[in-house]
Image (cartoon, rainbow, N blue to C red):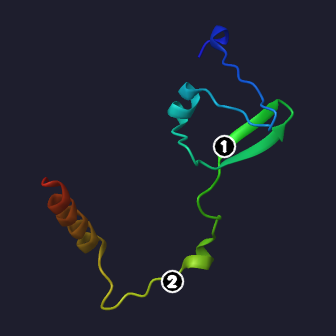
Amino acid sequence: MAASDLLTTVVSTKGQVILPKVVRESRRWNAGTRLVVEDTPEGVLLRPALAFPPTRLDEVVGILHASGPARTVEEMDAAILREAAQRHGRD
C-alpha cells in the first residue's frame, strides 16, 4: 500500500475501531479473531493471539503412549505416502 493509500477509521463512543475490510481479508482476521493489543512508541500494534499458551518440550514429551515396536523413518515415510495417496488419490 502506498503512502497515498493510507486507510483511516474512527474510534466509537464505546472505544471500538473497525478495521478496514482489505486489512481483515489480507490478514485472514474473521469475526471472532482474538487480537493482542500492544501500545508501542510508534503506535498501537495488533497481532493475533496465540491459540494455545506456549509450551516447552519437557512439558509434552511422553504425553502420547505408543504400543508396539518403534518405527523407522522409512516406515513412517511409507505410511505418510500411503495415507496421502488414499486421501488424495495420487502418489
Q: Which of pointers 2 and 1 lies earlier in the amino acid sequence?
A: 1
Q: Is residue 32 left or right of residue 41?
A: left
Question: Which structural element holds mark 1?
Answer: strand
**Residue positioned 54% across, 80% down in the render:** 61
Q: Quadrant of residue 71?
A: bottom left
Q: Quadrant of residue 40?
A: top right
Name the amino acid type tagged 2.
Ile
Q: Is residue 91 above or below residue 10?
A: below
Q: Which residue is mark 2?
A: 63
Q: How many residues crowd around disc 1 within 10 Å: few (fewer than 14), some, or many (20 or more)?
A: few
Q: Quick one: 54 or 57, which is closer to the camera?
A: 54
Q: Which residue is mark 1?
A: 47
* Residue at the farthest right position: 41
The location of residue 75, given as percent across then percent down, is 24, 74
* Residue at the farthest top position: 4
> Which quarter of the rendering shows the C terminus?
bottom left
Q: Is residue 8 above or below residue 85?
A: above
Name the amino acid type tagged 1.
Arg
The location of residue 63, given as percent across then percent down, is 51, 83
Q: How many residues crowd around disc 2 within 10 Å: few (fewer than 14), some, or many (20 or more)?
A: few
**Residue positioned 56% across, 33% down in the render:** 24
The location of residue 39, given as percent across then percent down, is 83, 40
Question: Which of the labelled discs sits on residue 70, or is there none?
Answer: none
Work out how far the residue at label 2 is from the one at label 1, CA to CA, in angstroms. 30 Å
The location of residue 36, given as percent across then percent down, is 71, 48
* Residue at the farthest front position: 13
Q: Is residue 26 left or right of residue 56?
A: left
Q: Quick one: 68 or 53, which is closer to the camera?
A: 53
